[in-house]
Amino acid sequence: MSINEHIEHKIFHVELQTPKQNVKTLPELQENLDQFARKYTTLLDQGHCVCITDNPMGLLSFQGTEVIKELGLPCPAGQVSVHLNTFHTPADLQRIIDDCLKLGIGNLLIISGDGSDRLPKLQPQDVAADEAASVTSVELIRHIRQRWNGQFELGVAFNPYEPFDHEMEKMRRKIDAGAQFIVTQPILGRHEMLDKLLKLVDMPVVVEAWMSKKLHLLSLCVGYEIPEDTVHNPMDTLKQLVQNYPGCGLYLSMLGYKTQLPHLRKVWN
Amino acid sequence: MKIVVCVKQVPATHDVSIDPETKRLIREGVAAEINPFDYYAIEQGVRMREQHGGEVIVLTMGPPQAADAVREAIACETDRGILLSDRAFAGSDTWATSYALACAIRQIGGVDLVLCGKQAVDGDTAQVGPGIAAHLDWPQVTYVSSVSLVNVGCLNVRRMYEDGYELVEVHLPAVLTVVKEINTPRVPTLTGRIASLKADVPVLGPSDIAADAGLLGLNGSPTRVVKTNPPPPRAAKSVRLEGPSRDVAKRIVYEMRMLSLI
């Protein structure tokens, strides 16, 4: 199922992080894996698309396809998407792609990513981009398009909190490299840069909704300090996004599985 | 090929304090991690096993929590690990440390190759690897950036020095210390992490490795840290530029060009 079909059928993209690697005991790891499996299958059962992150914020986590295989989790066509960043060895990149193909995961969100000292970085020669100074999402998309042409639908990120001209120049390069859909950073109700983007691009756009009440956690993302006591009703914000961006998909981060998941269908149906 | 990789657990923070009496780092209660350079030694050992067969054993000396460093190495696909931990080892300088590690390596038996990271980021001495070689009376090559097996019992290694590289042939058994250029360390997989959490990490004391207690710990350390001083604050000159951002940006570029930074 393509992103366009996700939007047409009002299928939420729900972000799901794999367990972190900094576990000290086997029971703790097992509990974390069990929790991941519960959330994963719940999301699939409710018809959503599970979007699995890739070492978010440079925090060493288990790789999504490996967790799916280890736990024997299902991968219904079009219901699983994997983030893929540039912090991998060439061997790991190959393994992730191979696993995605075997599992039938056809949707990848390609991002440059946040590295750390412990995460190796792809080098230009690893993705046949010898002329590039370093590997960003642009080089990675191009490499995947050239190497596995037509086997994946490739998405890229859009950050409305960066200077518009710079962000659009990056977007132009991403599209030239083969991007086929766009996922935004969290949008609170409406953002003029997103409005401009929608007029300029002719491809599916998925808008991220921040589903945590802790809005101050977005301070780094938006580039200004949000006071910790800022009141934020995520479900209201989600409803605003549905209203303001009717032709867009919706990507939910920090979803509350007990308090919010049961009510999603009322918001977008 | 039986390979021993020596690793060290170091503070995971720069915010450490020195014991005023022993002049040693206070490690208790401080978050710890594997010495970053040791990941390259671990990776090198695992790659050599993958290419030539054999076994990779990780070895460390430290307090009980240093078992985490052993498990981290097992998560990175070493076969097993050993922790040397006993009050008798406490306060060891690099000579006493390398003596204890050498005793353990003798006790393991049949070791062909010892790999160490270039240096530990807390002590920065780069002495333990050479110390192990001295205690074992084995050849050593430091700052190794590549290794290839010539034939059974002989390696060709490329060694970095200030002006370039030298190619060295070394007969086994030997000790190598490795630099970052040698490889790109793998990230543990879920399978590796599960194996590390299930692994049994034996804890050995002086009697288990036939070590002379008089050559361990503070008493076995010929060096003494008599004083530590923080480095003097950098006398950095700073200039604050104000004005419209476009003008400031031009000025910054100008200043960087004048300093030949760009």
Image (cartoon, rainbow, N blue to C red):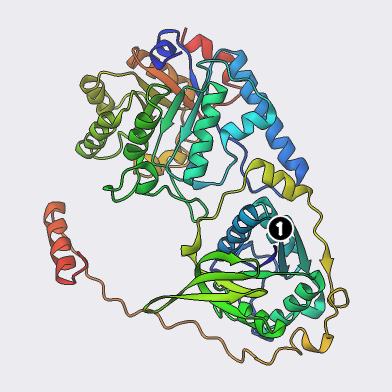
Residue B250, position as x, y percentages in the image? 12, 58
Question: In the rendered image, which quarter is residue A262 located in?
Answer: top right
Is residue B154 visible in this depiction of the protein?
yes
Residue A77, position as x, y percentages in the image? 53, 15
**Element at label 1:** loop
Q: Is residue B136 above or below residue A175?
A: below
Q: Residue furthest front?
A: B151
Q: Residue furthest right?
A: B207
Image-based side of A88 in relation to B208, left or right? left
Q: Is residue A12 above or below residue B67?
A: above
Quadrant location, the C terminus of chain B: bottom left
Number of numbered discs visible in the structure rendering: 1
Pick the front one: A87 or A35: A87
Pick the front one: A162 or B219: B219
- Residue drawn at x 45%, y 82% is B231
- Residue drawn at x 65%, y 70% is B153
Q: Chain of mark 1?
A: B
Pick the front one: A21 or B156: B156
Quadrant location, the N terminus of chain B: bottom right
Q: Is residue A247 above or below residue A53?
A: above
Residue A170, position as x, y percentages in the image? 26, 37
- Residue drawn at x 86%, y 79% is B210
What amino acid is at disc 1?
Gly
Is residue B96 visible in this depiction of the protein?
no
Q: Which residue is mark 1?
A: B54
- Residue drawn at x 38%, y 21% is A150
Residue A217, position as x, y percentages in the image? 47, 40
